[in-house]
Amino acid sequence: MSAAPAPGVGAKAPADDSARPVGQSRWTPYALLSPGLLWLSVFLVVTTIMLLPMSLSSGRAFSGDGTFSFDWQFANYADAWTQYVVDTPIFQKSLIYALIATVLTLVIAYPLAYTIAFKAGRWKNFLLVLVIAPFFTSFLLRTNAWQTILVDTGPVVSFMEASGMLSVFHAINTPDSWPSWAQIFPEGLSAENRVLATPLAVIIGLAYNFLPFMTLPLYASLERIDVRLIEAATDLYSSAWTAFRKVTFPLSLPGVVAGTLLTFIPAAGDPVNPALLGSTSDALMGNAIDAQFKATGNYPLAAALSVLLMVVIVAMVAVYVRRAGTEELV
Amino acid sequence: MAGAHLQNPLVFRIAHPTTPAHESGPMTEPTSTSAADPTSTGGGADLHIVDVTKRFASFTAVDDLTLTIPAGSFFALLGPSGCGKTTTLRMVAGLEEPSAGRIVIGSEDVTHRKPYQRPVNTVFQSYALFPHLDIFENVAFGLRRSKKKDVRNEVEAMLELVELSSFARRKPSQLSGGQQQRVAVARALINKPEVLLLDEPLGALDLKLRRQMQIEMKRIQTDVGITFVHVTHDQEEAMTMADTIAVMNAGRIEQMGAPIELYENPVTTFVANFLGQSNLIKGQLTGKSGGDALLEVQGQRMAMPTARVHSERDDVWVGVRPEKVQISRAGTPTDGENSIAGRVTDASYIGVSTQYLVQLPWGQEVGVFSQNLSTEGPLGTGDDVVLHWNPAHTFALDAAQDADAGAEKIEGDE
């Protein structure tokens, strides 16, 4: 990263190029871009490109001679498909858990961001600090804390059980008659008397961990809305609810799109929440890839899974962004 | 730009099929008070603001304001920023609630009604067009909310009126300032409000466009006959457009009347300075003679009509507008006129007129706008002159008032 001598280039430029304003060289934009570009190319582009040949190679890391040979092993993708889509629906689970968590996060974050943007007054900055406060502790620690909160004998679970909520969640399941690839919640969304080690715990953990990523973009787009537009809507015979539906919400769509992407994409590949809050049957793609890399040493299969997940997410995001029509907004 | 359609009231009736075709015709939505007003030419309703006060924390924005705006009039609330004019407008619209007092439209008390329950629409400052909706949907917004049928025809007629038919599917950001302004007017007018509120509607436009829009707005108002309440800090805009102007300062009305009344016969120093310019000279009322009041100004005797004295006390500011003052070489006879000697300290020749600064014997400088009628050419700096004016152009204000009140704005605006 030391290869970004932006100040040096800027200082040298005026002597070369006296026609430009002082401090402006035609290299300045490149100099400013270079740290970011370098970072992205090393850690994103190169690694992604390395994934592709690996996903078409054969060999194992911890057995045999530990080397890989690139021999167009499309069978890796076939294996990934059979094992993680057809036989066990881990791939589908990842997307559906992430989807439910994203919707839950949106439902929680929208009123929160709305209140901070429009109603908080002088508490605005304080509330924003509270939103990002969780970042002061480690992601792992915070997820671990949910094990304590959701402990079987704790007040949260007792309340949920007594109020009948757990029975409702337990009733949400995928019938045995469905094929194996559709068995997303074979045991129900939660157990009858337990939240930990159920899909519900994983979804709660995901929703909690990504809440700031949803709240901040929502806040940013809500805060930018000119309140006179809302006044104009009420002046033009809209009740408060209609004004929200017809003006505020459509204008906050860029924030909704950004927040849902920032939540859904990492949630779909997250290994931490399933590992700490779920049972073994709640393993998601993050855990599968993690296991193939670290435990089995099957790098080619892990790479194929990664590529598969990436392609599907990119395709879904492309359709979603087009449907939401963000480019037409303002 | 100034719409040919606007000159044709027939076109407007397409948009407003219920607008009376004859001035004497029945009201579309008869109101008890407007029918009684012989000057009313069309729809709309009287707007009564009764003892209204608005306080924000410790600041009183509007202070016990009482105002009646007759149906069908074009009324301007004129004042510097922070005088309470916008707050008054927002209370009529329902966007602020008065701390005390009542707001009555026609015969209905709307003080505590929500904005969407009032027969009022607003043209907002900088328009507040919905950026995510196209022009058609912006204009249709109010009709859709009130579940009107035939939205399409009404919107198309309205867009035609403001000459934006070909822009129906554009977004507001693709329109120029003047076009956006017309969309904002169309969006409000299409709902046929009893009262149309305009909050500095031309403030964001450049000077030339503003002049055009002033004429266009005035024409629309004449065509539809709705009560227009227009808030502005631009005295020229208010004088061009409004039938009646209320000059507001610090939450109160300083003076209300026709533009000519306010300009020719101001009752406070604030009005004298805020509307145009005034020369204010210290003087004393010394007595009466017939219909005239007698004055002494720095040893000089003057006269003026008693009806133009607006002071309870004998110490007064003797006022005269710069263009009412004639300037002549010292020694010129000034029989029957009020006169004062002085010396020219500055003369700016600007073609149609010459602007002089003249120093009076006690040091005060006064301004004179003189049409270049003399064949000898303008007077020069250092010339001894006599200033004289018709006593009927003199006004007298309470000397306890600040002689500079309202004068600051002259530098800020064109």
Image (tube, coloured by chain):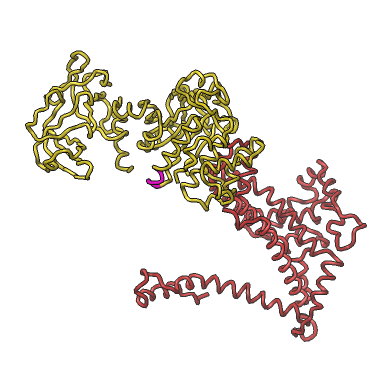
User: Most prominent secondary structure in the magenta stretch?
Assistant: helix
Residue B209 among those drawn in magenta? yes
Horizontal side, residue B373 vs residue B88: left or right: left
Q: Which chain is red?
A: A
Q: Nearer the viewer, residue A55 or A232?
A: A232
The residue at 55%/50% (across/down) is: B167
Question: Does residue A266 appear in the picture of this structure?
Answer: no
Q: In which quadrant is the C terminus of chain B drawn?
A: top left
On screen, residue B411 above or below A315: above
Q: Position of residue A319 (x, y in %)?
A: 70, 61
Tally of marks? 0
Q: Position of residue A113 (x, y in %)?
A: 61, 48
Q: Position of residue B342 (x, y in %)?
A: 12, 34
Horizontal side, residue B322 vs residue A247: left or right: left
Q: Quadrant of residue B81?
A: top left
What range is drawn magenta here? B206-210
